[in-house]
Image: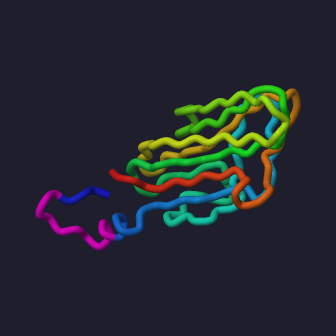
Amino acid sequence: MTLPAVGDLITAAQGDQLLAPPLFMAHQAVAQSIPNNTITALTFDTADVDTYTGWSSGANTKYTSQLAGYYHVDAVVAFAGNATGRRIIYTFKNGSQEMQVEVPNGAANACYISIARRVYLAVSDYLEIKCFQSSGGALSTTVTGAIANSYIHMHWVSM
């Protein structure tokens, strides 16, 4: 979308994009096994909202931009309890790491790691949320209710 100059009229399509911008919300309804010492893309098997159809159940680790602009991204990975090793969440844009958040794991309780950022996506750019754990063996994400699941929320902010 190209924004009009001062004094220009806004087309119906531009108005629709400004009034109903892209919004994507998805979560895990099924636990995912995360291998030890391997950066792994999170699968989001349930799309709650996808106003611009940037997600596909056949490629459920990615959101592909349908409208260029800045997006606010908020994601959480929910790991099952294990007192050993590290836990990391990442954002990847077009296959390249953009940002990470690491937390030490000091207890056998479930571990929730969140990441939030603003990222520019051109049309057809894609974003993935990935994670890492080093517990010594495979470790599952948790699925215990709407609040305790791994999720991704994205919304378009501006051009």
Q: Residue at x 72, y 53 (%)?
A: 149
**Would you identify the image quadrant in which residue 29 lies?**
bottom right
For the record, the magenta segment spans 5-15
Q: Is residue 106 above or below residue 128?
A: above
Q: Residue at x 49, y 41 (%)?
A: 117
Q: Is residue 86 above or below residue 121?
A: above
Residue 104 horizontal/vertical position (percent): 72, 28
Foreground of the two, 58 or 98: 98
**Quadrant placement of the N terminus:** bottom left
- Main SS, magenta region, reads loop
Count of marks overlaid on the render: 0
Q: Does the magenta-highlighted stretch encompass residue 60?
A: no
Residue 140 horizontal/vertical position (percent): 83, 43
Rendering colour mode? rainbow
Foreground of the two, 89 or 123: 89
Q: Residue at x 53, y 39 (%)?
A: 93
Residue 136 horizontal/vertical position (percent): 87, 27
Give the residue at the far right of this rendering.
137
Residue 82 horizontal/vertical position (percent): 85, 35
Q: Is residue 13 left or right of residue 23?
A: left
